Image (cartoon, grey):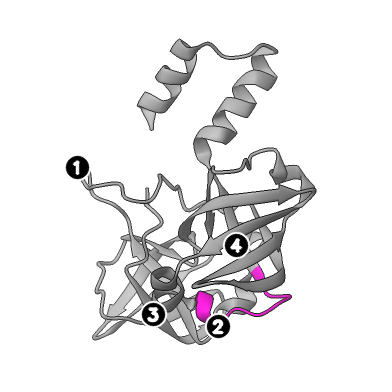
Amino acid sequence: MFTGLIRECAEVLFYKDNILSLKAKYCPNIGDSVSVNGACLTVVEVNGGSFKAELSHESRKILAAENFKGFVHIEPAMMLGSRIEGHLLQGHIDACGEIVKIEKDENAMDFFIKAPKEIMKFLSPKGSVAIDGVSLTVGEITGDIFKLTIIPHTFSQTVFNTYKIRRRVNIETDMIARYLFNFMQIGKKAPTWSDIDRITAIY
């Protein structure tokens, strides 16, 4: 599990033959789970100042792996009892979206992302979403495009300050929204507040 608060921006040393090598201040152990641009990957090798993670075939099909260059967001898995200052994430990417517009909004930056229609049902204004592993709040939604407002601190401390129009990004929708949607589809009825309390207590 992760929170969407980025530990640091790690430098990509190489991405080849399904192996991603990163240079970072953070030093994990072999077998640890680390979120890289929002994807939960397993550490398979650790060297002084760097570590390697291996990507499965399924991960390579879903992720925007072309962004494994330059710098990427990393976050170690949260520990039991840790503060949750973002929102709960699994590191399971739902789909890739595309940045279609970037606008300055006073001191902040607005990013407009076009997402696959099949995941739009999990997004709602003021709801949570993770973009490349960063916990963010959805602003406006128009069709299959949603807006995110990035405050100066987040903009300066993440790779968002390098993003351009047409860049693909990894999207993880709010998992409680996903579970509630599936619950309603299976049960064919709206959940009660008791149902919602039970589901949220699990996560």
**Amino acid type, callout 4:** Asn
- The correct choice, above or below, for 187 with respect to 161 in the image is above
Q: Tell me the element at label 4.
A: strand
**In the rendered structure, which disc, 3 or 1, sits on the residue that comes first in sequence?**
3
Which residue has dot 2 on it?
162
Q: Which mark is residue 170?
A: 4
Q: Position of residue 42 (x, y in %)?
A: 40, 62
**Amino acid type, callout 2:** Thr
Which region shows up in magenta?
Answer: 160-168
Q: Within 10 Å of the Cα at label 2, are there few (<14), some (14-19), or many (20+) other Cα atoms?
A: few
**Distance between the alpha carbons at the discs numbered 2 and 1:** 34 Å
- The correct choice, above or below, for 129 with respect to 70 in the image is above
> For the residues carrying marks 2 and 1, which lies nearer the camera in this image?
2
Q: Residue furthest left?
A: 81
Q: Residue at x 41, y 56 (%)?
A: 4
**Distance between the alpha carbons at the discs numbered 2 and 4:** 15 Å
**In the rendered structure, which disc, 4 or 3, sits on the residue that comes first in sequence?**
3
Q: Which mark is residue 81?
A: 1
State yes or no: discs 4 and 3 in contact (Cβ < 8 Å). Answer: no
Question: Which residue is more in the foreground, 183 or 113?
Answer: 113
**In the rendered structure, which disc, 2 or 1, sits on the residue that comes first in sequence?**
1
**In the rendered structure, which disc, 1 or 4, sits on the residue that comes first in sequence?**
1
**Amino acid type, callout 3:** Ala
* Label tally: 4
Which residue has dot 3 on it?
10
Q: Is residue 135 left or right of residue 84?
A: right
> For the residues carrying marks 2 and 3, which lies nearer the camera in this image?
2
